[in-house]
Image: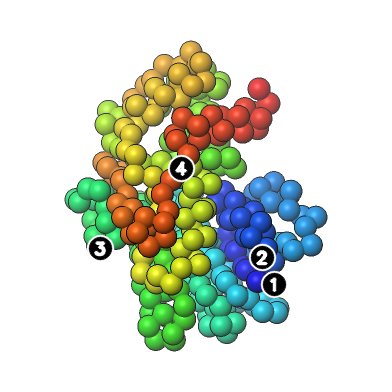
Amino acid sequence: MIRSLVTGGAGFLGSHLCDRLLAEGHQVVCLDNLITGDIANISHLMGNSNFSFLNYDVTNYLFIDGKLDFIFHFASPASPIDYLKVPIQTLKVGSLGTHKALGLAKAKGARFFIASTSEVYGDPLIHPQKESYWGNVNPVGPRGVYDEAKRFSEAMTMAYHRYHGIETRIVRIFNTYGERMRMNDGRAIPAFLSQAIKNEDVTVFGDGSQTRSVCYVSDLIDGIYRLMMSDYDMPMNIGNPEEVTMLELAKEIIQLTGSRSKIIFQDLPEDDPKVRQPDITKAKELLGWEPKVHRHEGLQRTLKYFKMKLGV
């Protein structure tokens, strides 16, 4: 049986990845120190004989007994509210954590997968963003702890690939949403949904003209799985290229929830990207992948989950 390790496996994306791997017949070792992950995200897997959980920090010495075929390194705070709260841990998991996980891949002869991000493009000067774009990142700004940690992790991954011959895969994840997102994680969709469900003011930063391209979680996980099983070893964008402004998204969510909320505006955070849209030509051509879940349907599913969590 194929055996896979998922670091950050109790997080939003990591837990959905664990589900997918188990469905594909893998044995799964889930590792998470629960700084931003939640044991509730994987509680439904605890009785599965092919699933095991380790409460552990990947930045420490890393040893897993037995064989490993695949290592998915997803451990990292992933929202501004988190990495501004724990900036040192964010830098450490992208650098030391990636180094430890790559060392384990080398020792086990495992294929290594790094969850990178569209944030490596920074506040982009090219639109939409292709994988060949090197980015426009402020390394000393407040978002630099996340952006540069991910850029470093990509460089470290390619160094192990070139120097040690490790099989590696790099995904650049664009904005993703769905069940198991934390309601207070600071990202737009959970913030808008939480505020709208409670009939509170919906907070839009800037004038709301900044754009994002949001991908439903099941589509993202499908792209990730296909990339790991492919023979492509350079960075690849996975995300939904349908672009929407933050103001449009806020209005959509207010309408979807039937909320009495009003939209209020606050100052745009420092270095907040003005546009974000993936060029997914490579994913289409090499993986046969493109998103299937329309935003309205994905938001309905996410709303149902948030209402359940809020008990309404």
Question: Would you place residue 94 above or below residue 200 in this image?
Answer: below
Q: Amino acid at mark 1?
A: Met
Q: Earlier in the sequence, mark 4 or mark 3?
A: 3
Please provide percent x and percent y for residue 298: 50, 35
Residue occupied by mark 2: 26
Q: Pointers 2 and 1 in contact (CB under 8 A)?
A: yes
Q: Pointers 4 and 3 in contact (CB under 8 A)?
A: no
Quick one: SS at disc 4? Answer: loop
Residue occupied by mark 3: 132
Q: CA distance from mark 4 to mark 2?
A: 25 Å
Quick one: SS at disc 3? Answer: loop
Q: Residues within 10 Å of mark 3 (few under 14, many from 20)?
A: few
**Which quarter of the picture shows residue 58?**
bottom right
Quick one: SS at disc 2? Answer: loop
Q: Pointers 3 and 2 in contact (CB under 8 A)?
A: no
Residue occupied by mark 4: 292
Q: Earlier in the sequence, mark 3 or mark 2?
A: 2
Residue occupied by mark 1: 1
In which quadrant of the rendered image does the C terminus lie?
A: top right
Please provide percent x and percent y for residue 153: 41, 68
Q: CA distance from mark 2 to mark 1?
A: 6 Å
What residue is rendered at 29% in x and 60% in y?
A: 131
Disc nearest the viewer among 3 and 1: 1
